[in-house]
Amino acid sequence: MPLVERPKIAQINCRLRAADVGAISMTESKKHAVEVRALWDDEAGVWSAESENLPGLVTEADSYQLLMQKLQIMVPELLSYSPDLNQQLGPEIHLILERNFTAELS
């Protein structure tokens, strides 16, 4: 039986730089929402808000609508100061409002 000559297979070397791998993984991974918790302060008559996963985010507003407007400005600004957090968080904001009140019993 005659020997069959195998076709020559071209070798392709593929190398990824560490920067390329980081860029690929960040584009494939989903960013996390900025978590904001707001509590109603009866004494001051304002919503007081802060975030655990975005350091420096502390604010207050007279209504939850005004609070949402402030957050839409503050979150991108704070993220612009930290490239690392900017890659991990936003643009989604998860706002949790807490307010205690009493129901009237008949």
Image (tube, rainbow, N blue to C red):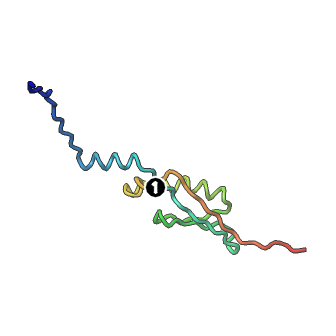
Residue at disc 1, secondary structure: strand
Where in the figure is residue 47, as x and y percent of width and height?
64, 66
Q: Is residue 76 above or below residue 58?
A: above
Q: Which residue is mark 1?
A: 89
Q: Is residue 3 left or right of residue 39?
A: left
Judge by depth and name the residue closer to the eye, 81 or 2: 2
Q: Is residue 1 above or below residue 72?
A: above
Judge by depth and name the residue closer to the eye, 102 or 80: 102
Where in the figure is residue 103, as x and y percent of width and height?
81, 72
Quadrant for the C terminus in the image = bottom right
Where in the figure is residue 53, as x and y percent of width and height?
47, 64
Judge by depth and name the residue closer to the eye, 93 or 8: 8
Residue at 46%, 55% (x, y): give it: 89
Q: Quick one: which residue is furthest to the right in this view?
A: 106
Residue 85: quadrant of the picture: bottom left
Residue 80: quadrant of the picture: bottom left
Residue at 40%, 53% (x, y): give it: 87
